[in-house]
Image (spheres, helix red, strand yellow):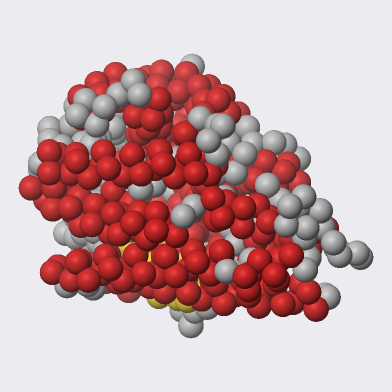
Amino acid sequence: MGDQIKTLIDVCQSMATVASIQSVLAWDQETYMPLKSIAHRSKQNAWVAQSAHEFWLSDTFKNALGACVDIESQEILLNDLSFSQRRLLQELWLDWKKKCRLPSKFVGDYSACIAEATHVWQQAKSANDYNVFQPYLEKLIQMSRQKADYLNPESEVYDVLLDEFEPGMTINSVSDLFVPIKQHCIPLLNQIQQLPLVYEPINGPIDTQKQWAYSLEILKKMGFDFDRGRQDRSSHPFTIDIHPSDVRLTTRLDEFLFFSGLTSTVHEGGHGLYEQGLDVDYYGTPLGQSVSLGIHESQSRLWENHVCKSLPFWEGQLPHLRTFFPGDFDLVTAEDLWRQVNQVKPGVIRVDADELSYLCHIIIRFECEVALFDGTLTTKELPEFWNERYKSYLGITPRSCSEGVLQDIHWSSGLFGYFPTYVIGSICAAQLMASIETSIQSIDVCIQREHWIVIKEWLAENIFKHGRTYLPNDLMKKVTGSEISAHFLIDYLQKKYESIYLTKLS
């Protein structure tokens, strides 16, 4: 590696160190921060965000980048580079151009607005009062429009916002993926709800301290390194990436919601493995970053849905469950647990949704966002629009704003364009699992016997190590032989629910 690239990487890592401070602040805000600290935290977030942004705009970074790439033309100035090194320079130049288009003051103001809006959202949700949050949502949408205009005034606003999370995706390409899922899953959902599902249930109460200990054991068996990460509790499970040596997970536990706690842990564990598996030598550069949120979500969905919700998983775990929770699992079989965790039962809360109806939750949010940004929907009309979609797609209507339009933190965090990545993640997870099944001999036996490290190793080799070397679609084609396609997910869901419900589904 030449001196110019080494210097550039050093500068990138200095910038990333500053930016990572904001990740620690965000984690603390969601876990341990005192309630009345939000005003000062908002100032902290604004300062760090603005400082990190100004680092990007500094002569130090511009000179380091300019020694490798022509600043005006994007022409690479160095010879004898590997493919990954050329991709590093190409992606850094694109990142820099985006940063240059955003004024530092706007970045600081936007970050401060998010910190305040998140706090107000929590209060509004607790009080079940959308009107408290609506002005902040309106302001965030206006600022997001301004952000998109800074970044790319020639493109549709929502396409620009979506590209921040899922490079290369547009409203049209997302719709092309979602339409066949919607056409297949809504009829399948309606058909399944008419079928009986017989199993011996576990209902709780199940001691949450024992659940906590069990969740830690599960993460260890997945390969999560607790010397480089930790798990805490929060009302909304999430993963924060600070550095590959410092990855924070959270889960939520309830004595009457055993499956929810376990699947939350496994889900966030999938995210955590990706973050811990990124190349630490390239920390702060595109080669040490996840390629997209859709690919990131594919990791959590693969572990949650294809591993944790599989029959072999419960066949292997039942003996351990009876040891961890004496008496609680004595009357159930592995098949009982498998059927219960996979039961299709539409509800209003996204994070509690079964695997099939979850897709509808996300498609509804995508349609809300598109309408908000194309001007056909106002923030005042949003709750009614939301409720109409829930009635149409899932056959249910939220009883309140708290279990309706206020249930998610994402919009208060300015994350417009984020929600579609969840379904893209489910699509990619099914596609990756199809490749794993052909690559790893007797994968069901591995899952049953807790040989889960082979899955982590396969993902490390095929996903983690590449960082952003390839665009998401190119990465999926390289790994699976096919561009991102919804048919893997549709086929998987069809086969899964025919097996669970013991009937041929049309």
User: 90 or 353: which is nearer to us?
Assistant: 90
Q: Is residue 159 above or below residue 29?
A: above
Residue most extreme to the right? 80
Tell me: 233 left or right of 299: left
User: 102 or 19: which is nearer to us?
Assistant: 102
Tell me: 433 left or right of 264: right
Tell me: 369 left or right of 129: right
Query: x, y percentage for residue 108?
Result: 37, 60
Report whether residue 236 is seen.
Answer: no
Q: Residue at x 48, y 39 (%)?
A: 149
Q: Residue at x 23, y 37 (%)?
A: 405
Query: x, y percentage for residue 282?
Result: 66, 71
Total label count? Answer: 0
Q: Quadrant of the N terminus?
A: bottom right
User: 134 or 476: which is nearer to us?
Assistant: 134
Q: Is residue 498 above or below residue 228?
A: above
Q: Residue at x 34, y 20 (%)?
A: 376
Query: x, y percentage for residue 67?
Result: 77, 68
Report whether residue 274 is seen.
Answer: yes
Tell me: 445 left or right of 303: right
Residue most extreme to the bottom? 227
Query: x, y percentage for residue 302?
Result: 53, 50
